[in-house]
Amino acid sequence: MASEKLEVSVDKLQIGDRLDMSVMVQDGIYTIKFFKGQFLTDDSIQILKESDVKKVMIDTRYRDQTLRPLHIKTIRTIDLVPGMKLVNNVYTDRGVLITPNSKEIDENIINKLLMLNIRKVDIQEDKRLKDNLYHVFEGIYVNIKKVLTALFKNLLAEKPIDIKNLLLSITDIIIAAAMNPHNLTKLLQDKDTEEFPLIEHSSRVAVLSLLIGLYLNMERDDLMHLGISALLHDIGKFKIPPRLWKMRVLKPHEKEIMNRHTEYGYVILSNIKKFDYRVPIVALQHHEFFDGSGFPTGLTEDMIDPFSQIVGLANYYANKIESADETDKDVYYNALIDIIMNRGTKFDKRITNTFLSMIGYYPVNTIVELNTGQTARIVKIVSNAIFRPEITIIKDANERKLDTPVLLKLVEHPEISIEKNIQVGE
Ligand SMILES: [Fe+2]
C-alpha cells in the first residue's frame, strides 16, 4: 500500500494522524523532533500548533478508522507502568532508536527511558488491559483482607505484628492502584460480611487513601507510609469492647469510650518502632476535622497532619457507606453529597476536590474534558447515575468556544465519558 501524502495545516491535524515527514520544533528549552511515521497525540498536535510550523505532510491512509490507532495519548515517562504499549518509536535526541513502537514495555525499558532523560512518550490505551487489571486488583484486595485478619488475630492474642507481609501488601495495592484507579469504583461498592468488620473497613479506607495520595502526586515512600497508616488507623478499637463496635446508636458514655480508640491506637502504634512517625499520628488524628469540630483534641486546619486529613476523609466516606441502611439505594450519592457539603468546613478543599475527581464524581459547574476532546460543564447530577451527569459542551475538540452550548445527557451516550476535570466547581 503506497503512502498518500497530503500537506495539511497544523490547525487541521487530528489525533492519530501519521506524519510523512520529520519536523523539528522548539518547546521552551527543549528541541522536539517528530519523526516520519510518527502517530500524533493531542499533546504532540498542541506542541506543533504552538510552534512556528504552519503545515506538515501526513499519510492520509491513516485517516481510515481501521488503520488509525485508537486511544493514544502522551504521558510522562515516570507514569509508565509495565504492560503499556508504545505508539511511536522512541529516539535519543541524536536520533538513535531506543525502543521501537508497538512494543509492550517492561521495567528495563522504563528505566532506560528515565536514565536517558526522555520526559514523555506516546502510549496506546488498551481497554482489555484495564479490564484485566480489575481482576488483579480484586485479588490484591482479597490478600489485604487475609493479611489484616492474621494481623488482627495476632493483636488480639498479643503476638507480634507481621510487618513484612503488611509492607508487601501495601506495595501491591500501590502498584495496582497506579495502573488503573477507576476500576476501583465497583470494588469499593462490594459489601461483604467478615469475621471482623474492621477488616473490610480498613481495606476500603487504605485503598481510598492511597488513591487520594496518588492523585496528589505523592512519592512512593510516602504512599507506603500512608497505606500503613490507613490500614491501622482504627487499631485502637481492639482495646474497646467488641459489642460497642457493632452498635449503630451509642449512648453518650458509650460514645466517650468508643472515641478513646484514637488514643489507644496511638499508644499501640507508637510502641512499634519500625513504623514511620505518622502511623501513630493518623490513629490519633483521623477523627479531627478541619474546622475543629472533631476529636480527641479539636485540632484545626494545618494543625492536623496531612496524612490524617487524607485518612480522615477516606474514613468518613467509608463510614457513611458502611453504616447506611441496606435498603438505601442512594447510599453512594448521599455519602458524596455529605462530603461535598463539608468541603472547606470539615475537610480541606484541595483534598476534597482530589477525592471527588478521583472517584469520578464531578460537582455541578465543574469544567471537564471529554474523551472526544471537547470541553464541557457539569449542569446536573442524576441521582441514580451519579457518574453520568448532564453536561453542556462549551468548547469543541480544537478548544474553540461554541456559540450555542450543546446540552447532553451522558446516560444516553455511553460512548462519551469524562476524562478529567479542568476546574472543580465551587
Ligand atoms: Fe476511627
Image: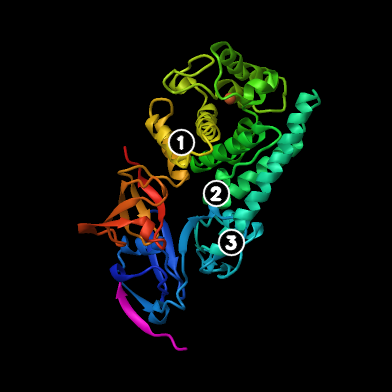
Q: CA distance from mark 3 to mark 1?
A: 30 Å
Left or right: where 283 falls relative to 32? right
Q: Name which residue type carries label 2.
A: Lys
Nearer to us of marks 3 and 1 is 1
Ranked by sequence position, the earlier of labels 3 and 2 is: 3
In the rendered image, is residue 218 in sight? no
> Residue 86 occupies which quadrant of the picture?
bottom right
Percent coordinates x, y for residue 179 in the rendering? 57, 52
Left or right: where 7 falls relative to 351? left
Q: Name which residue type carries label 1.
A: Ala
Image height of 283 relative to 97, above or below? above
Q: CA distance from mark 3 to mark 2?
A: 17 Å
Q: Which residue is mark 1?
A: 335
- For the residue pair 47 and 277, the one nearer the viewer reads as 277
Image height of 366 relative to 252, above or below? below
Q: Name which residue type carries label 3.
A: Leu
Instruction: Classify 10 Å Cα crowding around label 1: few (below 14), some (14-19), many (20 and above).
Output: some
Label annotation for residue 247: none
Nearer to us of marks 3 and 2 is 2
Q: Which residues are magenta?
A: 1-9
Instruction: Look at the numbered disc 2 and give the secondary structure of its residue.
Output: helix
In the rendered image, is residue 337 in sight? yes
> Residue 27 occupies which quadrant of the picture?
bottom left
Instruction: Look at the numbered disc 3 and give the secondary structure of its residue.
Output: helix
Q: Which residue is mark 2?
A: 186
Q: Which residue is mark 3?
A: 129
Percent coordinates x, y for residue 147 in the rendering? 73, 38
Residue at left 60%, top 54%?
134
Say whether mark 3 is within 8 Å of ligand 1. Answer: no
Verify whether residue 238 appears in magenta.
Answer: no
Percent coordinates x, y for residue 299 in the rendering? 48, 17
Residue at left 63%, top 20%?
244
